[in-house]
Image (cartoon, rainbow, N blue to C red):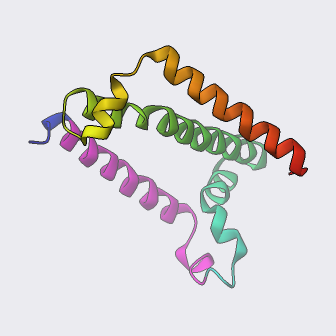
């Protein structure tokens, strides 16, 4: 069963998304960016919105903040997703192979990862890649 808090947060995020899109459409008419091939600025519609409302400096700052947030969310997903298979294996809800890998000692796992990284970096330096 899905927890109620997750369902509520999905609904709230959807409402915020619709609200932001409606506010953008209130400032930037949709006819200015609908044929995306004819309007290259349609890829940066939120920056265009911020520029019209607050000016070009704020639009530049806002664009940088959006990029910062996107990179942060990608890194959070990369670091956080690794816990899902580990938790599934430790509770017994995955394959036998995964469960066996969680029984290994941490030092052995760290040694194998560092060894693999060392071999990869040496091969990369030799090939000039």
Q: 88 or 54, which lies in front?
A: 88
The residue shown at (64%, 26%) is 114
Relative horizontal placement of residue 57, taking residue 74 as reference (left or right): right
Q: Is residue 12 left or right of residue 70?
A: left
Q: Position of residue 40 (x, y in %)?
A: 71, 74
Is 14 left or right of 94, judged from the image as shown? right
Q: Position of residue 85 (x, y in %)?
A: 34, 37
Describe residue 60's horizontal placement relative to residue 81 as left or right. Answer: right
Residue visible at 91% across and 50% down in the picture: 128
Q: Nearer the viewer, residue 15 or 37?
A: 37
In the rendered image, residue 117 lying in the magenta stretch gets the answer no
Q: Position of residue 107 (x, y in %)?
A: 51, 14
Question: Looking at the image, how many numbered discs can be counted on the residues?
Answer: 0
Image vertical order of residue 19 relative to residue 4, above or below: below
Whole-percent x, y for residue 48 in the image: 67, 59
Secondary structure predominantly adopted by residues drawn in magenta: helix
Instruction: Pick the residue in front: 76 or 99.
Output: 99
Q: Is residue 12 magenta?
A: yes
Q: Quadrant of residue 100?
A: top left
Q: Locate the N terminus and report the quarter of the image it occupies.
A: top left
Q: Residue at x 58, y 39 (%)?
A: 69
Against 92, is 53 above or below? below
Residue located farthest toward the left when viewing the structure as drawn: 1
- Residue 28: quadrant of the picture: bottom right
The answer to whether 53 is drawn above or below residue 84 in the figure is below
Question: Which contiguous range is marked in magenta?
Answer: 6-35
């Amino acid at each position: 069963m899905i927890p109620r808090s997750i369902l509520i947060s999905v609904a709230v995020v959807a409402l915020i998304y619709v609200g932001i899109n409606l506010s953008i459409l209130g400032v930037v008419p949709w006819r200015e960016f609908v044929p995306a091939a004819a309007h290259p600025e349609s890829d940066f519609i939120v920056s265009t919105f911020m520029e019209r409302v607050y000016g070009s400096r704020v639009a530049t700052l806002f664009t940088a903040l959006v990029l910062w947030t996107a990179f942060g969310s990608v890194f959070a997903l990369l670091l956080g997703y690794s816990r899902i298979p580990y938790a599934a294996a430790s509770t017994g809800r995955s394959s036998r192979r995964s469960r066996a890998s969680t029984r290994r000692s941490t030092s052995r796992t760290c040694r194998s990862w560092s060894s693999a990284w060392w071999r990869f970096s040496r091969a990369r330096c030799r090939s000039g890649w």
